[in-house]
Amino acid sequence: MKQMILRVAFVIFASGLASAHGTDQHVMGKVTAMSDNSITVQTAKETVTVYTMAETKFVKSGVPASIKDLKVGDRVVIHAGKMDHKLMAHEIRFGLTEKHQ
Amino acid sequence: MRKRIVLLSIIVAGIVGAAAFGWVTIRRGFSARDNPSAMEAYVAKTARKLSIPASERDAKNPFAPAAEVLSEARTHFADHCASCHGNDGSGKTEIGRNLYPKAPDMRLQETQNLTDGEIYYIIHNGIRLSGMPAWGTEEKDEDSWKLVAFIRHLPRVTPGELKEMEQLNPKTDSERAEERDEERFLNEGKSPHLNGNRHH
């Protein structure tokens, strides 16, 4: 009982807001559709929709970019984590790399 | 008498509510994916502040942010710090995002408002009950002071500097192979042994 009271007291102190992040997943494919907060990608196997967040990093040809620089038809590599059963993009890379420009 | 009953009822309701909240949370379990509560963050920040002696807090960086110092610190940061903090100091890395508490965005005021001495002390001594280890030897270490100069530079770090740092980040053979595959896909559209969607 004493232990339970201590646990409850600790939990009241320690508990916080839930914010789910998953282990990163890599999505590689061609952009087939875009909206203000999502990008649909056709990979070799399936169609995947990845959602963007305020903190999503866009990198074009190795330098910081924005969603405006991305177009339907571009090849992308997206590193994303699952949050509430949705894939949320942490980083979206696209564009040719230096050696190929 | 009536006032006492009202007060007692409020206290009992508070205890019952807190106990119910605690019980539900215990059943849900703990995860490092959560964010610390406001109270936890306040207690932790206060404890961190109290843990830094006043004499250390006011210490001045013996190194001016000269190009040579920043270049050395940038290399050091890319090799030792970036896996949690990111090359840009944003903390948006797979480890940094999932630590408890999460790695802070060091470009923001919360870090930039710390004194040079406080930042040095945190690097040199680490922060207990967090993911931040103590770096360097027990003696004063010049490398940590140079890192303080680089952390001050983070809000103005350039794309060129970030690109250079990427080459210096420690990587495993499989991470290098994965990067090569991704680069090949972006440049040529070829992904020979990938199905286009994988976990790690």
Image: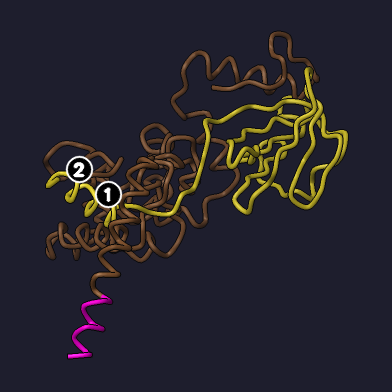
Chain colours: A yellow, B brown
Q: Which residue is mark 1?
A: B145
Q: Which residue is mark 2?
A: B141
With respect to residue A69, does B197 lie above or below? above
Q: Look at the numbered disc 1 and give the secondary structure of its residue.
A: helix
**Residue at image point 79% right, 18% down:** A44
Does the magenta stretch mainly form a helix, a strand or a loop?
helix
Q: Quadrant of residue B71?
A: top left
User: Bounds of the magenta span?
Assistant: B1-10
Q: Look at the numbered disc 2 and give the secondary structure of its residue.
A: loop
Residue A82 vs residue B193, the one in the foreground: A82
* Tag 2 near tag 1, CB within 8 Å: yes
Residue A85 vs residue A78, the one in the foreground: A85
Q: Is residue A81 left or right of residue B126?
A: right
With respect to residue B191, does B12 lie above or below? below
* Amino acid, disc 1: Trp
Q: Is residue B174 left or right of residue B179?
A: left
Quarter holding the N terminus of chain A? Answer: top left
**Residue at image point 43% right, 39% down:** B98
Find out whether residue B140 is within the magenta segment.
no
Callout 2: chain: B
Decide: few, some or many residues near mark 2? Use Cα within 10 Å; few <14, some 14-19, many ≥20.
few
